[in-house]
Image (cartoon, rainbow, N blue to C red):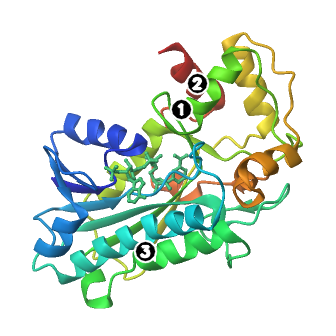
Amino acid sequence: MRVLIGGGSGFVGRELTRLLRDKGHEVTVISRQPGPGKITWGELESRGLPPCDGAVNLAGENLMNPLRWWNESYKKDLFSSRIDTTKALSQAIAASQSPPHSWVLVSGVACYKPSLTAEYTEDSEWTPFDFLSQLVKEWEEAALLPENVANNTKQVVIRSGVVLGRDGGAMKQMLLPFWLGLGGTLGSGTQPFPWIHVSDLAGIIAGSLEPPADPPSTSPQVYNGVAPALNTNYEFTKELGRILRRPTIFPVPGFVMSALMGSERATVLTEGQKVVPNRTLESGFQYKYPDLTSALKQIVEN
Ligand SMILES: NC(=O)c1ccc[n+]([C@@H]2O[C@H](COP(=O)([O-])OP(=O)(O)OC[C@H]3O[C@@H](n4cnc5c(N)ncnc54)[C@H](OP(=O)(O)O)[C@@H]3O)[C@@H](O)[C@H]2O)c1
């Protein structure tokens, strides 16, 4: 299979590329920078979609970029880096003479309203209620293919939780303070913490890229990209401390997180959703890291 990955140079994209190449597939990355095995977004626009059997979009300005202050220009970049790249790919697929059989977008669980009690499956209804949920709405809409193309191209949306892995994402920023014994719960700690190991997310994406068995439905198939274990921030914090053999006695109050990160962004960590991957499990996907202990051990001990 030939797979095109927008933003494939990033944390999730590197893991997905490794997995696909191990399975014998060919990968081309779409990037802002030219290079071997890559095309640029400008080339996609000017030359159209290169021949491919599957396409994925993972591009997006990092939401947890510690070097960027939470302001209008950052918020604009969060939107445009996701929506413009997703639109560029869906339009290139729609305009292609031979569109791929699968088109996958990785979005986020921020569409579900934070709650200590509600449990969200892929079938849960939602409407935007804040900055990040509005972002998810416009991002997923940007991926939609016209009906005549969707008849032949399977559309998949994977709503990912916080992606855990050694080479990037949240863990890259958390490991040092935890190693130094400065880790602690964020906010109250009782909030749900939807997470997934990067290797499992790559596995769900790779599975979604397989050709459809039946003619695809014209609306996207949604999968919650989270581990089946439902954990709180407290459980995550204590388990990471236990595996690292470090104390986790320095809670960071919610108002400090909001002051440091901006309240709209801090909600990802100080509030959370119980997200259940019903359809992912029903699809028969076998998690390598279904629980925190196995996921964190793999990350810390490798
Ligand atoms: N990591 C998580 O915890 C998490 C959770 C939920 C959802 N997601 C979503 O999953 C996708 C992949 O996540 P990731 O952690 O792999 O992302 P990442 O490493 O932060 O970024 C992926 C790629 O996006 C491209 N990119 C960055 N800023 C951009 C900009 N301003 N304009 C256009 N492209 C830009 C970069 O590629 P080039 O430099 O090659 O252009 C980068 O390698 C993202 O869309 C993210 O929102 C991630």
Residue displayed at 87% across by 43% down: 190
Disc 1 under 8 Å from ligand 1? The reply is no
The residue nearer to you, when weighing 168 against 233, is 168
The residue nearer to you, when weighing 22 against 138, is 138
Q: Cβ–Cβ below 8 Å for labels 3 and 2? A: no
Residue 86's label in the rendered image is none
Kind of residue sitting beneath label 1 = Tyr
Kind of residue sitting beneath label 2 = Ser
Q: Cβ–Cβ below 8 Å for labels 2 and 1? A: yes
Does the rendering let one see residue 286? no
Residue displayed at 59% across by 65% down: 75
Q: Quadrant of residue 4?
A: bottom left
Question: Badge 1 local density, few (<14 within 10 Å), some, or many (20+)?
Answer: many
Kind of residue sitting beneath label 3 = Pro
Q: Label 3 belongs to which residue? A: 220
Name the residue furthest top: 245
54 to the left or right of 12: left
Residue displayed at 43% across by 64% down: 81
Under circle 1, the secondary element is: loop
Q: Label 2 belongs to which residue? A: 294
Task: Compare marks 3 and 1 and give the one earlier in the sequence.
Answer: 3
